[in-house]
Image (tube, rainbow, N blue to C red):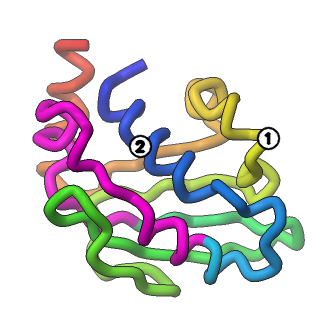
Amino acid sequence: MKKQSLLICLVLALLFTGLAIADDLEDTIKGNLNKIDLSQAPGIFRFLLGSPKVNLEVTRENGSISVFGFVIKNSAVQEFKAGGVEKPDYIIKIHEKHMTEKALNTLPELYSSGEIQIVPKTFFSKIKLRIVKLFI
């Protein structure tokens, strides 16, 4: 799996911790984002990730889509916005059924099968993703 994909899976794993027992998806995601600290990640991960704006699109069981945005700066989440951030660098798409602690063990498989999609939206995020694919 690509290093960037591994880092995104790490972020997703931290996001989903505790979702199985939470009643409010927004509060749970916001709380879990506050726990993310990527300062211990290898330098190449931090370089490739940069300071992205990310929208997480969650397809709910009823078919509706909830969007949550966040910005990573200095290896931590600095901003959270229900409804998403403007001009995101990446969009992560996932179905609510995969946002459980049980699903954490299958994040790489979910990504490989397309159940979790990471879509680069800006010119530079597309270039970074292509560079990663060339070398890894």
Q: Looking at the image, which residue is at 39% across and 59% down?
A: 36
Give the labeled residue for mark 2.
8
Q: Position of residue 128 (x, y in %)?
A: 16, 38
Q: Is residue 90 above or below residue 77?
A: above
Q: Position of residue 88 (x, y in %)?
A: 30, 68
Q: Looking at the image, which residue is at 18% across and 65% down?
A: 73
Of marks 1 and 2, which one's residue comes earlier in the chain?
2
Screen quadrant of the N terminus: top left
Q: Nearer the viewer, residue 6 or 119?
A: 6
Q: Nearer the viewer, residue 86 or 106?
A: 106
Q: Is residue 92 above or below residue 4?
A: below
Q: Looking at the image, which residue is at 17% across and 43% down?
A: 46
Q: Which residue is situated farthest in the right direction here?
A: 62
Which three-letter amino acid code belongs to the residue tagged 1? Answer: Lys
Give the labeled residue for mark 1.
102
- The residue carrying pointer 2 sits among few (fewer than 14), some (14 to 19) or many (20 or more) residues within 10 Å by Cα, namely some
Numbered disc 1: secondary structure = helix
The answer to whether one can see residue 41 in this image is: yes
Front tag of 1 and 2 = 1
Find the magenta span and give its range. Answer: 29-54
